[in-house]
Amino acid sequence: MHIFGTRFFFTKLNDFVAGFHPRSLPPMLRANYARELFSWFLLPLMLGALEGGTMAIIVKKMFAGTPGIGPAELDFAVAAVSAAPNVANLTSFIWEGLAHGRKKVQFISRLQVVTCSCVVLVAFIPLNLYGLFALTALIFISRAAWTGVITVRTAVWRNNYPRANRTLIAGKMAMVQAVVLALAGLLIGEAMDIAPESFRYLYPVLALAGFVGNAIYRKVRLRGQRRLQRAEQDGRKQGDARLDPRRLFALLREDRFYARFMWWMSVFGLGNLMMGPPQVIVLNDQFHTSYLQGILATTVIPLLVMPLAIPAWSRFLAKSHVVAFRAVHGWAFVLAALAMWLATLLHSLELMYFASVLLGLGFAGGSLAWNLGHHDFAPAHRDSEYMALHVTLNGIRGAIAPFVAVALYYPMAKAGWGAWFFFLCFLINMVGLLGFMSMRKDIPQRKAHEI
């Protein structure tokens, strides 16, 4: 029985690993998939240096006690660093407009180079008030560039991979990215615990990995590039005002069902985005965690859970409308907020780690729905436009939520009610989830837009 069980385990493991091989796909998809897969083994090492939860822990601990930076100012700096990736999403309509009619792969490649360059510059910041400002600026610039990568990449995926394969491929990319980001977080946390100044050497090395990944990505070929450019140019002639955010928000009037979806995404997303900065503050001020312990909770555990959960979420999304998907997937974040409330209330680091596991389940499904969900609404030639609206709205709530979170948490914590802040997040998430459930019965009975 023991031998049979071991053989079964290794058979399943072999099947899982083999599923990443290009031969698992139709021949016409293999070359592009292989290039993207190898590039996403390397680019996340660079991106891990800028990951929101990791940088929030680093800022909170590295600048603690710095002259001129008080506790309240530092907490709001944590909010700023946490908000930066989402604030950067407000640039999505700019990238969508700039990429209009241009070669998508080359455009993405240039933005990857900008992001890698920012990681190199982090190594030179001084550990003072000006260094804190510089670090925040570099994080914003890099995340703005990466927003362009995310916004434009969806058009590459839609044109290179048929819908039947697209969700599975996106899931594989997300699994690879999650594992490598987690490894980067472990490396950074361990190095910072050993020597807080180690980032001056480690960050350039991580950036070098990103540059190599970028060199591989540049060899990706976009299928139907000329056809896509003609469609985009025709859209411009018909009056599509690119680089104009008003054109993006016109979608909310044109597609009412998508507008409802964006509304409930905003409510649900607000509760999720509010949890991050107070979690970092609690980990440091209440649990007194090390760099590695803090990064485990905010980054590593969620990212390691993602590859385990993505295959199931991928299969579910492949056969579901994104609204129905969110109505089920949303429970992960609802329960994560509840677990975080109990962890803080009971002063249990183990419960906080469990909340991180639940966040990982939520991030796993969210990574797929984030990149592919708008395909259930968008015609092919407006794919980037729908994605840009989604990313921009996330940027708006992401610009607000972390600062609102700290502004609410700070007085609640001083009054001894800090744990109940996470219960508030739970209530907001629950309202958003009920909104998705209310939409599920109204899913239009029509085929999703496909290629």
Image (cartoon, rainbow, N blue to C red):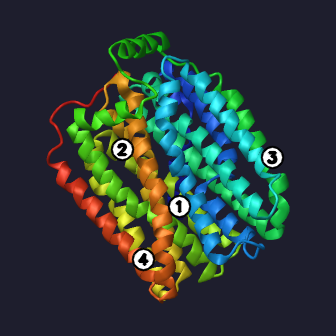
Residue 196 placement: quadrant? bottom right
Task: Give the structural element (helix, strand or loop) at label 2.
Answer: helix
Number of residues whose C-alpha sits closer than 10 Å to that of mark 1, classed few (under 14), some (14–19) or many (20 or more)? many
Q: Nearer the viewer, mark 2 or mark 3?
A: 3
Amino acid type, mark 4: Phe
Position above or below: 157 against 413: above
Q: What residue is rendered at 27% in x and 54% in y? A: 327
Task: Give the structural element (helix, strand or loop) at label 3.
Answer: helix
Q: Is residue 298 left or right of residue 58?
A: left
Measure the C-alpha gap from mark 2 to mark 3: 38 Å
Q: Earlier in the sequence, mark 1 or mark 4?
A: 1
Q: Earlier in the sequence, mark 2 or mark 1?
A: 1
Residue 129 placement: quadrant? bottom right
Q: Relative to the observer, which residue lies in front, 165 or 150?
A: 150
Measure the C-alpha gap from mark 4 to mark 3: 38 Å
Find out whether the residues at labels 2 and 1 contact each other: C-beta distance under 8 Å.
no
Return the residue at label 3.
204
Amino acid type, mark 2: Arg
Return the residue at label 2.
315
Q: Relative to the observer, which residue lies in front, 143 or 433?
A: 143
Return the residue at label 1.
302
Measure the C-alpha gap from mark 2 to mark 4: 35 Å
Residue 262's x, y, as percent?
A: 31, 46
Which mark identifies residue 276?
none
Return the residue at label 4.
421
Residue 113's x, y, as percent?
A: 70, 34
Residue 294 visible: yes
Q: Earlier in the sequence, mark 2 or mark 3?
A: 3
